[in-house]
Image (cartoon, rainbow, N blue to C red):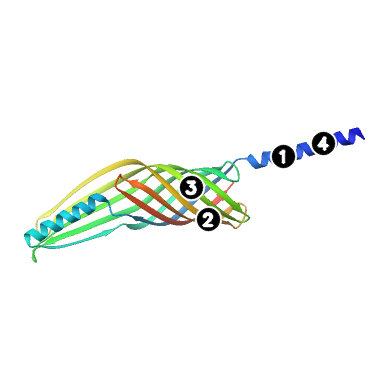
Amino acid sequence: MLRKSLLAVLVSGVMVSGLQAAEIQSNGYLFGNIGQADADTPDFVRGLDSELGAIANDAGLIFGSDYDGKDSAFKIGAGIQLNRYVGLEFQYIDLGTASYKAELSDGFDTLSAKIDGDTDGFGANVVGTLPLDRFKLFGKVGYHQLKTEAKQKVSMAGVGSLTESDSTTEWVTSFGVGASYAFTPQIELVAEYEQYRDVADEYDVDFGSIGLRYNF
């Protein structure tokens, strides 16, 4: 009787230990997302637009401008699920191109200016997950080193053009929320929204995306 009791305790202990080990077991995953980035108007663009408008007004010129902060964007990366609720991700992200165009004209000749800003870089996210059977809800905070390359071109028909480029690299924070649905234990469909703060120390970028996650 004593032997059977000891054996039962031993088996129970092994089972509990196995369940605890499974609970804290780390699992890796790969992911890829594609979507649209929407960059706020940078402060320097607002200032430049105001200055050009004032010059046109004083000189009696025709002035027009346009800012487009929306572009296709994507990210790829890998993560590790430390337990059911906490994970850590590493990623590369390309936030696309934001463009500003302006024209000054006297009705005959037109001076055109264009500025394109391309942003990409690497970073990491801490992810908190709420598992709901096949569905998961998650929130994340991140820290990223993003490089923004600005290309500036000023041109006038019959005169020529001048092109310059510059770049800046900044560490930026981000936050995001999202949800996923598991088709299988390995494959999940993911939808999420993220915001990258103070990109190029000038503006915020919103990024909405869908993607796939492969668990292994």
Looking at the picture, which amino acid does disc 1 mark?
Gly
> From mark 2 to mark 4, how far is it between C-alphas?
41 Å
Disc 4 + disc 3, Cβ < 8 Å: no
Task: Say which element carries label 2.
Answer: strand
Question: Which badge, 4 or 3, is on the more N-terminal residue?
Answer: 4
> From mark 2 to mark 3, how far is it between C-alphas?
11 Å
Horizontal side of residue 128 vs 123, given as left or right: right
Q: Which residue is mark 1?
A: 18
> From mark 3 to mark 1, how far is it between C-alphas?
30 Å
Callout 2: few (<14), some (14-19), or many (20+) C-alpha neighbours within 10 Å?
Answer: some
Image-quadrant location for residue 63: bottom left
Residue drawn 13% across and 60% down? Answer: 104
Question: Which badge, 3 or 1, is on the more N-terminal residue?
Answer: 1
Horizontal side of residue 209 vs 46, given as left or right: right
Q: Which residue is mark 4?
A: 9
Looking at the picture, which amino acid does disc 3 mark?
Lys
Looking at the picture, which amino acid does disc 2 mark?
Ala
